[in-house]
Image (tube, helix red, strand yellow):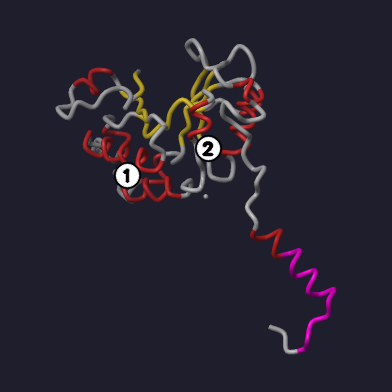
């Protein structure tokens, strides 16, 4: 195969302090949610580690981020992506991230692919800047879709190459530095008149 988130009474000072404290806790972004990255960050020793061919598997769980694995294609959600990146950084694994999840999350009732649902899944990550992790070699690519040409997987209608190109364009409009990929037979990728390749 190839790879192509009012009270009426006057409040007392103590109550105001409590409200202020709760407000800060509830609305301030979690500055330490994601690991530091990039050549100028505290974890700069990781930068440049991404050499050679990553060895790993699809769906590798973070608990298995250890030798002999040096890479993985992992499914994440907006709530888990930060912890997965931390685990990969700690154990020096390079990742291809499946951000949208399984195909059932962005399929029509008849099983066919729904591009707008896919985009909505991707939109939950708009607050995440993946570029530092691309720079340091931690994130290799955004995994768009698995086997788009397999009609039986997509309700009898393969995902078109034009849809794949739009998915790649949409991803790159949010994260220009993040490469995109799909998994498909080389013959399917070569058959595209649009020039779709194994990695954009």
| Callout 1: SS | loop
Q: Residue at x 47, y 27 (%)?
A: 96
Mark closer to the observer (1, 2): 2
Q: Nearer the viewer, residue 41 or 25?
A: 41
What residue is shown with label 1? 111
Circle 2: element type: loop
Position in image of residue 198 (x %, y %):
31, 22
Q: Nearer the viewer, residue 39 or 59?
A: 39
Q: Which mark is residue 185?
A: none
Residue 76 x, y percent position in the rendering: 53, 37
Q: Quadrant of residue 18?
A: bottom right
In the displayed structure image, the side of residue 91 where residue 99 appears, left or right? left
The stretch drawn in magenta includes residue 100? no
* 37 versus 65 height, above or below: below
Asked whether residue 18 is drawn in magenta, I would say yes
- What residue is pinned by disc 2? 76
Q: Which x, y percent locates residue 121?
A: 43, 47
Relative depth, front residue between 130 and 183: 130
Residue 119 shown left or right of residue 138 in the figure: left
Task: Give the distance between the C-alpha atoms of the residues marked 1 and 2, in whole angstroms.
Answer: 22 Å
Image location (x, y in percent) of residue 99 = 46, 39
Q: Quadrant of the N terminus?
A: top left
Residues rendered magenta in the picture:
9-22
Q: Main secondary structure of the magenta part?
A: helix
Question: For mark 2, does the 10 Å Cα neighbourhood hold few (<14), some (14 to 19), or many (20 or more) residues?
Answer: some
Tell me if label 1 and label 2 are in contact, CB under 8 Å: no
Q: Is residue 98 above or below residue 127?
A: above
Q: Quadrant of residue 48?
A: top right
| 157 left or right of 105 in image | left
């Amino acid at each position: 195969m190839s790879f192509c988130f009012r009270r009426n009474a006057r409040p007392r000072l103590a109550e105001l302090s409590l409200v202020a404290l709760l407000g800060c806790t509830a609305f301030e972004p979690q500055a330490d949610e994601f690991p530091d990255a990039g050549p100028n960050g505290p974890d700069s020793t990781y930068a440049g580690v991404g050499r050679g061919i990553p060895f790993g598997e699809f769906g590798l769980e973070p608990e298995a981020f250890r030798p002999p694995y040096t890479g993985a294609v992992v499914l994440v959600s907006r709530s888990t992506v930060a912890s997965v990146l931390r685990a990969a950084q700690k154990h020096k694994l390079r990742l291809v991230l499946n951000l949208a999840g399984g195909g059932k999350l962005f399929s029509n009732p008849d099983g066919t692919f729904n591009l707008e649902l896919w985009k909505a899944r991707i939109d939950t990550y708009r607050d995440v800047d993946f570029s530092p992790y691309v720079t340091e070699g931690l994130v290799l690519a955004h995994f768009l879709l698995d086997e788009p040409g397999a009609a039986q997987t997509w309700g009898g209608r393969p995902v078109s190459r034009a849809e794949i190109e739009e998915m790649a364009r949409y991803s790159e409009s949010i994260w220009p530095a993040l490469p995109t990929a799909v998994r498909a037979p080389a013959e399917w990728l070569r058959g595209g008149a649009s020039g779709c390749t194994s990695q954009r």
